[in-house]
Image: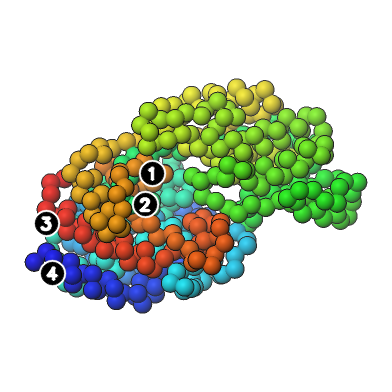
Amino acid sequence: MKEELISKIDELIENIDERLIEDTIRLVNINSEQGEAKPGAPFGEGPRKVLDEVLSIGNKDGFFTTDYNVGVISLAMKEGEPDLGVWIHGDIVPAGDGWNFEPYKGTFYKNCIIGRGAADNKGQLATLINLFRIFKELGIGLNYNPAIYVGSNEETGMRDIKGIKGNPDAKGFMNVCKFPRLSLVPDSSFPVGYGARGLNTFKIKSKKPLKSLTLTAGLDETPGSATAILEGTDYPDKLPKCKITKEANKTIIETYSPPRHTSKPDPDGNMITFIADALLENNLVCGEDRHILELFRDASINIHGETFDIDVTGKDPKMGRTITYAKTILNHDGYVELELKVRYPIDITYEEIKEKMEKVCEERGLEVNSVLGNRPYINDDKNEVVKTLTKIANEIKGTVKEPYICGSTYGHYVPNAYAFGMDGNCPPEDFPQGRGGAHGVDEAVSIVRLKEAMKIYARALLALNEINW
């Protein structure tokens, strides 16, 4: 009977392309970048629109929907409290420039959907909604109550879970609501992620304004660009990896690198490395400014935190080394501020990292500001749930992978949570390297991969019906 049921599910999945594409595009077309907090929309109107759209879909399809009034909603199979939560986020990072496709007008191209948020996380959301529909259509009864939870602030702090002090619309799910007994987070890869590095944002700011130039990098509207503006035009006309423009007694130097996810920095550096190299190697900055530019350059190319002596390899080899990503340089009336993302294993603490960074920065005339972000965590990687999910994912994908340590997910705050798929980010073959990734330009999600993930999740839901957890 189980084999017959799985065969029916697979047949429906194989013929679901049109509806899956339509639902994904429907969600991608909502610009859900974080915006100004408004009553009932603590993270802006865009993220709120995604929540309302999913509530509308869930109500229309006869599911049991709940708005927790904290920036999180759920769509459950049954009435009552959910036992299993599948955690998705509907918010996105800014699109930036350099797209060949419209970022907020989902496009179906070579069996992929292109658009901001397609791979992170709207394709997954559409996939799960359609799987729930299939279970409902086939009348599949489970002895537990699964639900899709949709948050609206994963990309900028997970305050939908943690809350914002003083904002009654953002009390934080963890502070006012009950978590399911078990949770899955399809914002990573198969088979199963049982823990994650810590993730924190450090802001390194100069104590004095720059004297030689104005400097910015990685702005929301130009995430892959760095720009230096120098007074006067008596500067070189050509520099490696630079575009140089001279106008109105100013010289503008620009560099570019394809935007990347902060968990995967380029060991050859990014636009911050290139702009700092150009300025330093050609003696275009004065003495005091050199110390600042040197640190920014070192921090951008030493992607394991060597600059600050925070390069640590976890005792659990799957947790890996510290990873740092120099993301932006902001200009505050001449004062420059580098934003550095730091992912770290459980073998070093946030407090130790901050102390080491402060020591190095103090010597260069810089100060460090940060607020504790996500501490690292590890769950049991040998229980029956992990074994079952790992086996299912490997069988469908034809792999022999083991459970792993993943990136930052809702699992940092949702108890007993495991990353589980969906491997949807597979750009078209004619996309050049660096294009089509999550958070990148022309972000793409593969329909083939999403359907494969749907088959894995279908088997997982059925298997969880037969084991204790």
Q: Which residue is mark 4?
A: 4
What is the distance, in whole Å, between disc 2 and disc 1 at their CAs? 8 Å
Instruction: Answer with mark 3 or mark 4, whichever residue precedes in sequence.
Output: 4
Q: Which residue is mark 3?
A: 143
What is the distance, in whole Å, between disc 1 and disc 3 at their CAs? 30 Å
Q: Which residue is mark 1?
A: 406
Task: Inspect this view and state whether residue 90 appears.
Answer: no
Image x and y of residue 112, in percent: 45, 69
Say whether residue 409 is left or right of residue 181: right
What is the distance, in whole Å, between disc 3 and disc 4 at their CAs? 19 Å
Image x and y of residue 421, in percent: 34, 54
Q: Nearer the viewer, residue 404 or 244?
A: 404
State the image quarter where residue 284 is shown. top right
**In this rendering, which labeled residue sits more in front, label 3 or label 2?**
2
Confirm or deny contact between disc 2 and disc 1 (CB under 8 A): yes
Can you say which quadrant of the picture contains the C terminus?
A: top left
Label 2: state its secondary structure: loop
**In this rendering, which labeled residue sits more in front, label 1 or label 4?**
4
Label 4: state its secondary structure: helix
Image x and y of residue 69, in percent: 35, 54
Residue at image position (70%, 33%) is 294
Q: Where residue 189 is drawn, which disc sits there?
A: 2
Q: Amino acid at mark 3?
A: Asn
What is the distance, in whole Å, between disc 1 and disc 4 at their CAs? 34 Å
Characterize the local packing of mark 1: few (<14), some (14-19) or many (20 or more) Cα atoms within 10 angstroms: many
Task: Inspect this view and state whether residue 238 appears.
Answer: yes
Q: Amino acid at mark 2?
A: Ser
Q: Amino acid at mark 4?
A: Glu
Instruction: Answer with mark 1 or mark 3, whichever residue precedes in sequence.
Output: 3
Instruction: Answer with mark 4 or mark 2, whichever residue precedes in sequence.
Output: 4
Characterize the local packing of mark 4: few (<14), some (14-19) or many (20 or more) Cα atoms within 10 angstroms: few
